[in-house]
Amino acid sequence: MIDTDKPSGEHWTQAFPQVAERAAALLGIDLATVARHQHVVPGGFHVWTPGRGGAQAIVGFDGSAVVRESAFTGQELLAGFAAGQRNDAAVGQAPINHAASAVAAMIGVLRGEPARTATPSGPSEQELAGLIGAPFHQTTPEELTARLRGRGAGAYSLVGIDRTHGPGHWYVAHFDGNDVRLLDPIANRGVDWSSAGADVVRWWADGEPTTPPATVVLDARSAHGRRVWLRTTPLLAPRARGLVDWFAAQPPERVTKGLGVWHGFWWSALSQDGDDLRVAATDLTKPGIETMTWDVDPMLDALRYQAEMAAFCKVTRESIRFTANVRVYDGVFDAPEIHVRRYAASDDASGWVITPFAEQPRGGTTLVPAHEVWRRAPHLVRYLGLPTGFHAVWSNGGTSHIWDPAGAVVWDATARAAT
């Protein structure tokens, strides 16, 4: 692991202010952006402009630098720097061109328009979407290749990539009748999909994919450039975005291995993953609550069900934590009808009671931690975010009834089926 903070908590941009100022001047960004969009590398610091298509640099401890287009991977840039390449003195006279301006010009050429020269600033993603006529969606190389082959020879698409470290980039994917290749006009070359770099975490293309990606990566950077990330499904990604952003937004000295927070019902924490921090969740498929896993989908799925249930009942979600105690009637999980009801909480219990009948039990119950409810009957956890007074019934594989605290019917599956 490369630590960008000194033991005192001082970041390298504070320890080497002249290097940070040099990077800011070369890339036309402020010092806060330098601190956030950087990665320590052997011999210096990799700094880049945020987004896709802008310039990047490796700046040495002496302030000398190699500054290049977003077409180059971090490894390519580092190899050049290590070999002695330096061009920082010339950047003021010949600024680095923006990849978005180059792909916009190439789209014009493919449409039969006159060739245009790339410029140091480029159109935004929204402007590129307007140019191509469709918004960008996440995809995979395999999906886009099949899509362009299906359109026939001459088909093309705008492609954006995001990287773990370094600026994202823009390509034009083009089907020449034999192969689908990535055309990189800013570097004046064609590349294979694999040559885009092993550090690509997201692929984007104009238009809806025929087959969406099975999983997606969400990430964010702390004020000191620590990358926080997780992998989940497109369905669950909206439930994860706020969690990733919360971790990254904490005071930078706190964004480190072990930082944790309750995400609704579930506990999550940062774990080490190379130079980055990956979000982990308690693994409730294992005994106890000490084991953590990078499979965050069960956590996000529980939150999704609770949020949808609260929205359906038109109330604010008030989830308990999985360490809270729930009163469970003996043998209830094998009953054909399961009543889940929230009474007022006590010192040792959350107020949730799970029984095979509607009445409040006078005995026959045991206090168990809510994570045991998830292990035995995960479908019941969706109700554990409803406020005090709610009463729900699970039967025949679904929710059959819900009553609000006043006893009014919120849902009656039998009545709904009869209409």
Image: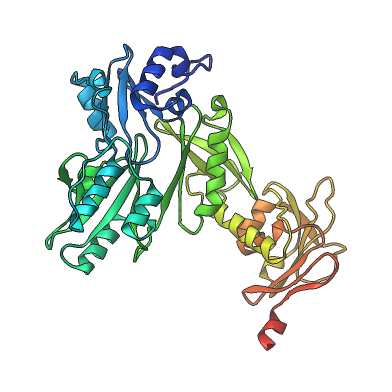
Above or below — where is 7 with respect to 300? Answer: above
Along the viewing direction, whichever of 2 and 358 lies nearer the viewer? 2
Residue 139 can be seen in this image: no
Residue at coordinates 69% horizontally, 61% vertically from top-left?
A: 310
Residue 241 can be seen in this image: yes
For this orientation, the residue located farthest to the bottom is: 418
Residue at coordinates 61% horizontally, 61% vertically from top-left?
A: 305
Q: Where is residue 64 in the image (x, y as percent from the top left)?
A: 28, 15
Q: How many marks?
A: 0
Above or below — where is 327 with respect to 248? Answer: below
Along the viewing direction, whichever of 340 and 387 lies nearer the viewer? 387
- Viewport quadrant of the N terminus: top left
For this orientation, the residue located farthest to the front is: 114
Locate residue 99 relative to residue 30 in the image: left or right.
left
Q: Where is residue 49 in the image (x, y as percent from the top left)?
A: 38, 33
Q: Position of residue 143 (x, y in %)?
A: 29, 61
For this orientation, the residue located farthest to the right is: 362
Above or below — where is 56 with respect to 336? Answer: above
Locate residue 351 relative to residue 99 in the image: left or right.
right
